[in-house]
Amino acid sequence: MTDNRLLDLVDARDFRTLFIDELGWENPNQPDTSFDVDGHKYTFSQVAGYKGMRIWHCADLPPRKIQRALDVLVGQSNQERLLIFTSPTRQDWRWPRRAQLGGTNAKLLAHEHVVGDRNTHLTQRLKAIELDFDENVSLVALLEKMRDAFDQEAETASVAAARLMGTLYSELEVAGVVDHDATLLLARLLFLLFGDDAGMWEPENLFETFLRENTADATLHADLIELFVALDTDERRRNLPAGSPYTIFRYVNGGLFHDQLPLPALTTNFRTALLEACEFDWSVISPAVFGSMFQTVKSKEARRGGGEHYTTEENILKTIRPLFLDEYRDRLDRAWDNKAQLTKLHNELGKLRFLDPACGCGNFLIVAYRELRALELELLIRRRDLDIDDTETKKLKVDRTQMTLDVTDLIRVTLDNFYGIEIEEWPARIAETAMLLVDHLANQRMTLEFGVAPDRLPIEIAPTIRHANAVEVDWTKLVPRTDGRTIVLGNPPFVGHRERKDHIKRDLSRAWGANPSGALDYVTAWHAKSLELLADRDGEFAFVTTNSIAQGQGVQPLFGAIFAAGWRIKFAHRTFKWTSEATGPAGVHCVIIGFTRDAITQPRLWDYETISSPAKEVPVLDQINAYLLDRPNVLVTPRTRPLSPQVAEVNYGTMPCDNGNLLINTVGEYEKFMADPVAARYVRPFVGSKVILSNKQRWCLWLDGVADSVIAESALLTDRVESCRTWRTEQGVRYPGGDAYKLRNIPALMRPNQSRPAGAYLAIPRHFSGNYTYLPMDHFPAEVICGDSLFQASDPEGLLFALLTSAMFMAWQDGIGGGIKSDPRFGKKTTWNTFPVPPMPAEIRARVAAAGQRVRDARAECTDQTLSDMYTPGGMRPILRDAHRALNAEVDAAFGALGPSVNTQHRLSILFDNYLELTNMKTVGTSTRMKR
């Protein structure tokens, strides 16, 4: 089977040979069927099929809106289908869009093929659905093949939509429309474009027809303003002249068209671009993509790059599925044959309230609403079928396909149960619009099943989206109390605890109280507000946050408060790379953590082999603790001194605080100073984390105890010292109380460091790559000055080195230590001082230290490698690997972990037990172990 062979059959419209002989599908099993649409008869012939999936060919190529109408008609008796519309020169293959859970807004996309075109992706798609003749593929597996092959089409449509919006936005800039008004205008136009294509009103293409027949380039701005006024006015209160083009438009309500929108004259190109946008099929775009689209069009840089920014929903589903959706879907399955249980479940769905207190463009609310409407639809269909079965049992024949039932009053999942808070105005407006549109799509789906859908115009049921700072809003007043559950979810903003601007400090104080812990990240304000909202309500909450909240010093104050309030972790996703809606998103490393007060629900945990790997659910035998480990719920508290008296303290290296004036960074500078007989006496090697890893040379001026008169003998020294004095003095303008300004009167010295070891020391990087299997460190003599990117400690017997470079310590570091993204951050108070080293007799200490020395000896034999080379994945040589394995065996034995199968989880279990024993601490939270 060659590409040309496949395309020749496509061009010849010999679809039976294509699908049956070449692709291995089965013969058709349905007769021809015809439909009348707009006075034209369209006939469909089945050309092939497979386990209920049927390929239909129509030897007509109507407009795409008629194609969609025909697809609905075919779909009444054939749910899984491919429709091929053809003319002698062109074809449209209408293939299912990538399915979303429940299929609420599943659409068919038209994949165009031009006869004779050999530069097409069609052959790749066809090969993706080829069936081996001896292969028994399930229908589900076949549909997955098809959807995987055509995913890109949905993304392409979204990119095309973003480009159309980008063009409109650019023309609004040219016309001088301010950003606020441009965003509001585009939101309104998006609603109208979507309504034209999604059957929101009759006749179809109402807005497009208005544009073409009743507007002109010069008057478009005024025409749109009048249209918006009409859309915001009840038909009974309009005062329009006879024959007004605005009469036919329905009253929308809902606030979307309420605010005044002053518009200057718009460009000719704007009207042209708007008419081009009318030709695009907006109904194929998920409302969940609108936020990404608008972020794209507002960025000039993104528009120049083509706007290829597509919002995935995968990560949102990672939150809502384990938080509530899986539970309700499981309950639907269990209630499938029980009408009373179905009714009970349906009533509970109607009592749910949802709040996203950092909703942005509404993606979490949109997807949550869409999925719940899909689940409700399944429930209503099942309830109808059970009622029909009862009727048929009574000998009354009912044709299910001909039933028409208005289920408007049966809908329990409604927009007015959804709430959002957003600090920026334009995303809040997009969220409102998108929620209205996803509601319409859900209602359309009901039309296919029941024949009648709710008429939402004028809009009387709408979500509540508050434009405000969420931390300042009283959530208890925003979300009414209900006898059902309140679900709080979303992706709050992240600002690290080190980036404490005044407004962030104020917000944290509002949320946590007068003096919140300095280790709390800004995002934890949303946790505090959730605890307040749900204090006396039935509910659960889950947030996507950076992984820092489950690392380091911030863990204890956050999770201590959560656990003390009776909450436990219901589910968690360990660190992964978040796909953001933002234009040009940074690679944020995130976790998702959901909380419940239900002591029975079995916790669920997902892990990632790498930050970009697929999620893999792992079993939880006990509970998920604050560090997202299946271990006792221990909150490790930072300490000022080591927990074990047998190990040495580590301290920061020396901070130059000099703007580079006391450092010598190049070989040329070094040679220049060494040529100066005075300056040369005070040049010292200087080591930082990069020097340790790369063996690159660096030097500094060490003038501790050197008299000013001696410094004055060297022009080089004098120039550097005075430059340092000037810089430190100038820092007083920006940071009057800062370290640099305080040191202005001792410009020849680095920041004094009383803990600097007198002799040789071990230098430990404060940050290092997450790719390293072990913590890379090394010993240095006293004359080498240790910079503040390192910790330093006396280690005369080598015990410190042996412990820190062991797998046991790395398990502790990875488990409870802080980090930057996925790179570990060695912490004196957090990881080293809390490291639960058990009492070790002198003999054991000597054996561990000797094993550490053998690691150093093995390193010494790898003379052609830097430390980074040695510990980079794949770079560790056998001699070093064997030395580390021997060291691990000694350290493991010292901690009580025996046997060849010791792994990270085993080590963590021992470490947490040791920590509890050494601190006399009790676990917190609720364990599931007793239940199990």
Image: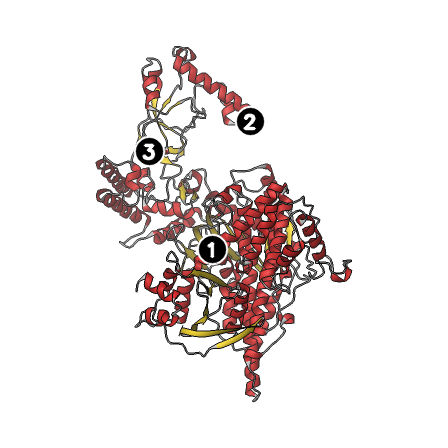
Q: Amino acid at mark 3?
A: Ile
Report how far apart the C-alphas of labels 2 and 3 lie in the structure.
33 Å
Q: Secondary structure at mark 1?
A: helix
In percent of the image, x 43 and y 61: which residue is there?
Answer: 113
Residue 657 point in image, percent of width and height: 45, 26
Residue 443 point in image, percent of width and height: 59, 66
Report how far apart the C-alphas of labels 3 and 1 lie in the structure.
46 Å
Of the two numbered discs 3 and 1 on the same chain, state the one appearing first in sequence.
1
Q: Quadrant of the N terminus?
A: bottom left
For marks 3 and 1, give the one nearer the viewer: 1
Q: Amino acid at mark 1?
A: Glu
For marks 2 and 3, give the one nearer the viewer: 2
Q: Quadrant of the C terminus?
A: bottom left
In percent of the image, x 56 and y 50: which residue is there?
Answer: 527
Report how far apart the C-alphas of labels 1 and 2 lie in the structure.
48 Å
Residue 485 seen: no
For marks 1 and 2, give the one nearer the viewer: 1
Of the two numbered discs 1 and 2 on the same chain, state the one appearing first in sequence.
1
Q: Are marks 1 and 2 in contact (CB under 8 Å)?
A: no
Instruction: Name the residue tied to disc 2.
Output: 734
Instruction: Name the residue tied to disc 3.
Output: 692
In percent of the image, x 66 and y 62: which residue is there?
Answer: 461
Q: Amino acid at mark 2?
A: Arg
Of the two numbered discs 2 and 3 on the same chain, state the one appearing first in sequence.
3
Q: Quadrant location of residue 143?
A: bottom left
Image: 271 above or below 126: above
- 128 and 326: which is toward the camera: 128
Instruction: Name the residue tied to disc 1.
Output: 155
Q: Residues within 10 Å of mark 3 (few under 14, many from 20)?
A: many
In percent of the image, x 63 and y 42: which residue is there?
Answer: 175
Q: Are marks 3 and 1 in contact (CB under 8 Å)?
A: no
